[in-house]
Image (cartoon, helix red, strand yellow):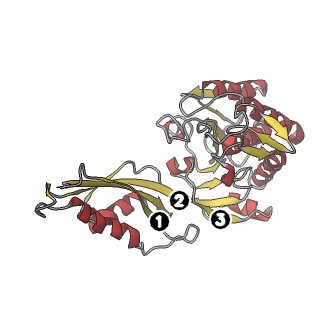
Amino acid sequence: MIAQLTKEAIDLLQQLIAKQSFSSEEDETALLIMQWFSTHDIKFESKNHNVWAKNKHFDALKPTILLNSHHDTVKPNKAYTRDPYKPEIIDGKLYGLGSNDAGGCLVSLMALFTYFYQEENLKYNLVIVASAEEENSGANGLNSMLSVIPPIDVAIVGEPTLMQLAVAEKGLLVLDCVAHGKAGHAAHGLGDNSIYKAMEAIDWFRTFEFPKVSEALGKMKMTVTQVNAGTQHNVIPAECSFVVDVRVTDAYTNQEVLEIVKKNVYVKVKERSLRLNSSAIPLEHPLVKSGISLGRATYGSPTLSDQSVLSCPSLKLGPGDSLRSHTADEFIYVNEIEEGVELYIEVLKNVL
């Protein structure tokens, strides 16, 4: 059964690659996912290109594991030398946009869910969500489904990790900062230069170290990525704006980081969102212990995924390599999918 499901999963991935599925434009790939569920006699529902299902013998009294990965993609970059929508297997590599991020993970999780779908007397319920709008952190992605699906106790988020256990993931906090001064003529030296005020704040962002260090993710990281000020050479600018990219570890919440920043800089600070928090799962959780028993290593992931919208413990795990994501001529090895399906099943067998 595993071999057949794996073959079908690889076939589905090739079909998904052949359909354009940019964030918020996933209607055609959603149809393919629905067809998989229909073919396997699995009851499913959909909302805003998100397709979800629960195991046949779902029991509301049992805890629930969420299986999640996304079927939207970024747009292909200009460095592509191959047709991004032409799925081809060459020398064991399946090429195509979304093959690695995160099509291989998605179809492997679908095979996993199908394998256990009809099982009775499981210790956990299983809910799967093939989600939309992950790449742009859109409003109609997984976050929009959390009030629709049953309550979740723990999640496996399918992203390429080489099937190693990402037990923690950095969150993201983007800050729009504005330093205010007073305009004046540069020749007279009058006015209050907002650039100098911004420089003081920027230097704080560059040098400040948060006292708490995450065991899995290390130190917090803040990076000023954009600066804008001035209209002409002889006018002291009254306003200087800049943007800060903050990668938040599980040692802090986004709200805590925002409060620390506001206490230390004398510029106006406005967060774009507080919802993309860091995430983690205890090393003693049965899912992690199961993965370790199968020879999988644990690590902290610097990249953002749909874990950021979950409030429950979550494990990032999937076939493929994160370093290939968003690259030209994207690919995943076929044997990575074969290994992924088998390992997903073995991890859950030890838990269910």
Q: Is residue 102 above or below residue 42?
A: below
Q: Is residue 186 left or right of residue 7?
A: left
In three-dimensional space, the C-alpha distance between marks 1 and 2, rounded to whole angstroms, equals 10 Å
Near-viewer residue (119 or 255): 255
Q: Position of residue 34 (x, y in %)?
A: 68, 26
Residue hosting label 2: 170
First reached walking from the N terminus: tag 3 or tag 1:
1
Q: Position of residue 296 (x, y in %)?
A: 76, 62
- At horizontal 65% and vertical 65% (from top left) the residue drawn is 299
Q: Is residue 129 above or below residue 222?
A: above
Q: Write down the quadrant of residue 77 in the picture.
A: top right
**Amino acid identity at mark 1:** Lys
Q: Is residue 85 left or right of residue 51?
A: right
As drawn, the label of residue 299 is 3
In three-dimensional space, the C-alpha distance between marks 3 and 2, rounded to whole angstroms, equals 12 Å
Q: Is residue 120 visible in the rendered structure shown here?
A: no
Near-viewer residue (178 or 251): 178
**Amino acid identity at mark 3:** Tyr
> Dot 1 surroundings within 10 Å: few (below 14), some, or many (20 or more)?
some
Label 3: which secondary element: strand
As drawn, the label of residue 221 is 1
